[in-house]
Each structure stands twice: as C-alpha cells, then as structure tokens.
Image (cartoon, helix red, strand yellow):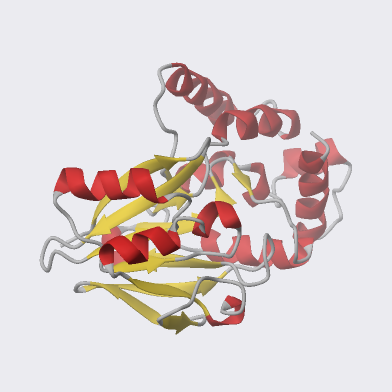
Amino acid sequence: MPLEIVTVPCLTDNYAYLAHDPATDATAIIDAPEAAPILQALTTRGWKATHILLTHHHDDHIAGVPALVAATGAKVVGAAADAHRLPPLDVELREGDTVKIGVSAGSVIEVPGHTLGHIAFYFPDSAAVFTADSLMALGCGRVFEGTRPQMWESLTKLAALPPETLVYSGHEYTASNARFALTIEPENAALQARAAAVAAAREEGRATVPARLEEELATNPFLRAASTPIRARLGLRDATDAEVFGEIRGRKDRF
C-alpha cells in the first residue's frame, strides 16, 4: 500500500511533508522548517509523528525539530555525514541505507552539491522521492558547499529513477525557475506549456510540487545538459554534460 503524502506549506516558501503508512499508522515528517503548521496538519488528520527525516542541515529545513520532538517524541533521522550540524540524530544514514515508515521501505540517496551532506529519500512503492534542495521543480538548489560537477552527478542519480516518480522538493520556486528555464530553452514547447500552467497555478494559490520526474526530464534545463538546442544556444556543442550544467547553474546564479 503506498504512503499517503501531505504537503505542508511552511515559512514563506518552504514545504514540509507528512508521509503516512495506512497499514501501521506510522507517520514521518520530511524536513521541519517550523513546528506549528506541521503539528496542525498532524492534528487535523489524527496522525502521530513517529519519525522526522531530515535532508540537510540548513535552518529552514530543521528549525522546527526541537518543538516537534518535544510534542511527538518522534525519532530524528538524517545523514551520518552531517550529524555534527543536524539536531541530535536517533538514526544516522548513508548512501543505500534503508529507511522505513511503517512497512514502507525507502532508500537513501546521497546528493551532495547544495550541501555536502544532502540526502534524498526514495520510496519506490509510492513512486515518491523527497529531494528538498537538490532536484527542484524546474530547477536545482544553488551549489553552496559542493562543486558543480558534484551537483551534476547528484542530479544524474535522481534523473535515473523511474519517470513516473513524483519529486517532492523543498520550496515553491517553480515560477521563478520557469522564467529562467525559458532563457535557456525558449523554443521548448513542453516548457512553454508548463510555464503557463505554473503561472496559472500560482495565480490561484496552488502548489506546483510535487512534479513528475518525466516532466522534469522534458523541461528542467538542469537535467537537460545533453540537449542539442541548449548546447547550441550556450555555444557549448563539444562540452561535457557536467560543463554544460555548470554554465546553466552559473547563469541561474546571476539571473
């Protein structure tokens, strides 16, 4: 039975997620920007948090952890590599480790770049991957601690997941990402259509995440370094995919 996943808006543009296993009533919180809206979402559904899964150490993803632990007693789960700068961990994870929400098993994918210790959580039976600030809807996170080639390698791992996978990222940045994407691949008809749909959704106050990986592969410039039109537009026909990605990331940083 797949997880029941609920999006919880937090702060200005962050998202936390609740992932509930109906078979056992176990519920995980994925990232914790602030406690109040997450506790409200749990109360509304009558769910009790059993775990808090953390993707990386940035404050806008962990600030709510102490209050959530105090209120629920949930176990805190995160990357072993970042244990020194995450809230105290009950479970430390590495690439390939299994994490369970009730009977639903997920795998840990190390995706350094945005931060060195960033991880993602992939639950194949639910066709869901929680990527926070690595792969984002029509974008990717800024490379703060790693290198651009490192970030490209991380995105390549995520791009290899089944195309029907839903990508649950950490922010509502899609409208801005769409505007930038159109500067990289303005003649991409799928991107044009998606940008219009995103603009309409935001005008109506609707979230634009999660997004299907299949759609990301067709429209997200950060996954499309092999695209001939993109390479031609950037003047990088003979560059490696990592070099093309690096140029796109640099342009986004200046956008």
Q: How many marks?
A: 0
**Residue 85 position within the rendered picture, expressed as x and y whole percent measured from the top left:** 61, 73
Is residue 125 positioned above or below 215 on the image?
below
**Residue 107 position within the rendered picture, expressed as x and y whole percent measured from the top left:** 40, 74
The answer to whether residue 79 is left or right of residue 247 is left
Quadrant for residue 173, please give it: top right
Is residue 15 positioned above or below 69 on the image?
above
- Can you say which quadrant of the picture contains the N terminus? bottom left
- Is residue 162 among the parts visible in the rendering? no
Q: Nearer the viewer, residue 96 or 114?
A: 114
The answer to whether residue 73 is left or right of residue 142 is left
- Is residue 255 among the parts visible in the rendering? yes
Is residue 191 positioned above or below 72 on the image?
above
Q: Residue at x 44, y 51 (%)?
A: 167
Quadrant for residue 36, please give it: top left
**Residue 234 position within the rendered picture, expressed as x and y whole percent measured from the top left:** 85, 40
Q: Residue at x 65, y 68 (%)?
A: 112
The answer to whether residue 234 is left or right of residue 204 is right
Q: Residue at x 41, y 67 (%)?
A: 53
Quadrant for residue 74, please give it: bottom left
The answer to whether residue 199 is left or right of residue 244 is left
**Residue 211 position within the rendered picture, expressed as x and y whole percent measured from the top left:** 43, 43
Q: Residue at x 83, y 38 (%)?
A: 254
- Can you say which quadrant of the picture contains the C terminus? top right
